[in-house]
Image (tube, grey):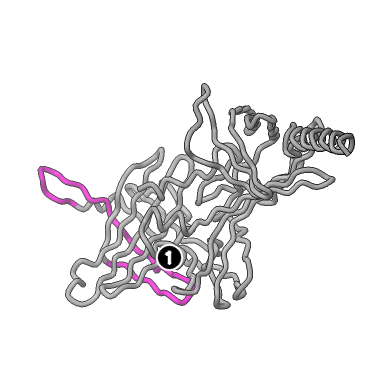
Amino acid sequence: MRKIIFFFSIFLIFACEDKDDKVNPLVGQWNMTNFSSGTYMKVNKTQEIFMGETEGSIQAKTISNGIPTDTYNLTEVNIGSYDDGTFINVSEYGDNFYADYNIEDYIGSLDQYDQSNLYINSGNINGAYHGTNFDYSISTNSLKIFPDTLYRKLYINGNEVWDSTRYAIVEGAIEQMTTMVQAGQNFLMDSDMFGPMEFPDELTFILDDDGTGRIIEKMWGQTEEIEIKWEATDSTLSWNECFDGECDSEVVDFTFEISSTGLSLSNYQDMCEFVDAMAGEGACDLMMNDEFGVEMGTLEGFWMEMNVSFSTMQASKKSGNKMLNKRSKWGNYSFINGYKPPKKFNR
C-alpha cells in the first residue's frame, strides 16, 4: 500500500508540473494577414438618410473691374430651419483654398437682418462679399440659389463702403442623394464621408510568456514599435503601452480567437458613447440628425469595428480594405494608437 501511495504521489507531482509548464497559445510572433474596418449605424425605423453624396453644385464667380477672376464649385451643403428663420451654408474646401457661402433668412421682427455672405481664401484672393438681395428655393433634398450678387465691403476712414467694381455672383442647384436604411440592420456607412481606420502595411505582434511583448506597425513608409504589458482571459486580450519600464494606465482591449489557421483580433468602439462624453448626453442623436438626417429618437447604435487576422508565418501579407483611399471626417483608428478623433470633437 505504501508503494502505491508513493507512486501515486510522484504521478501527481509530475502532472502538476506539466500543467504549470503549459505555454499560453497566445505566446509567440504573429504577423498580420488581413485587416478590415468599418463604421456602422443601426436605427429602429426604416428611413432615408443623407450620406454626403450630392449632384450638381452652387457656383461662385468672382469679378474684378468687369473681368472674371476665379470660379468655385461648392458641393457641401447644410440647411437649418428654426423658429427664427432659415440658415443655409454651402462650401468647398481644397488644399489651397476655401469658399464659404451662407444665407441668413430671418422671419418676423428680425427680417431687417437678412443677409448673404461669401468668404473666400485662396492664393488669388482673401476677401468677404456681402449682399441682401438673395433668392432661393428649397425642397426636401435640394437647394437652388438664383443669381445672387454680393459686393466687397471696405472701410475707408472708418466709413463702410461697398465696392461695386469687385463683386461675386453665386448661383446653381444642388441635390442631396439619399440612401435607404432598413430598421434593425447593421448599416455600413461606406461613403466619402467615412474613410478607413488607418491601414498598416505590415503589423507584427510579439507576445512573450512573461506578460511582456512588442507591437511593430509599418504605415505610410514609417515603422513604429512599442513595448507592451499584456494579459488575457479566455476571450479577451488587453495590454498597456510601456516606456522605459513604466506602463501607462490606458488599456487597449480586443476580443480574440485562436484556430488552426491563426489568431483573430476584434475591436469595437462605441462612437455615441464618445460623442456624448465630449458634448453632453443626447449629442449623438443631434449630430446624426444634423449630419445624416437620421430621425430623432430612432438611432440605436453608431460604432466602429476593426478586425485583424494573424498567422505565425514569417512574412506579413498586405491586406485589403475597400475604403482604403478615402479621407474620413470622423478620424482614424490605428492598431497601435487607437482612435484619433477629428479636431471638431475637441472644440
**In this figure, which residue is indicated by the disc labeled 1?**
290
- The residue shown at (53%, 29%) is 242
Residue range highlighted in magenta: 133-161
Q: In the image, residue 309 lies at what x, y percent?
A: 74, 44
Secondary structure type for disc 1: helix
Q: Is residue 214 above or below residue 77?
A: above
| 151 or 237, nearer to the observer | 237
**Left/right of residue 242 with respect to residue 4 in the rendered view:** left
Query: Does 144 lie within the magenta span?
Result: yes
Q: Is residue 157 visible?
A: yes
> Residue extending furthest front?
1
**Which residue occupies the foreground of this view, 334 or 162?**
334
Category of crowding for the residue at label 1, using alpha-carbon neighbours closer than 10 angstroms: few (below 14), some (14–19), many (at least 20): some
Q: Position of residue 22 (x, y in %)?
A: 77, 36
Q: Does the magenta-highlighted stretch encompass residue 269?
A: no
List x then y, in percent, for residue 166.
30, 49
Amino acid type of the residue that numbered disc 1 sits on in the rendered structure: Asp
Count of numbered circles on the image: 1
| Dominant secondary structure of the residues highlighted in magenta in the image | strand
Question: Considering only vertical position in the picture, is 68 above or below 1?
Answer: below
Residue 205 picture location, percent across and down: 69, 34
Q: Is residue 307 something one can see in this rendering? A: no
Q: Is residue 297 left or right of residue 115?
A: right
Rendered-image quadrant of the N terminus: top right
Left or right: 198 with respect to 93?
right
Task: Tell me what residue is drawn at x 38 percent, y 48 percent.
Answer: 67
Q: Nearer the viewer, residue 257 or 106?
A: 257
- Above or below for 189 versus 205: below
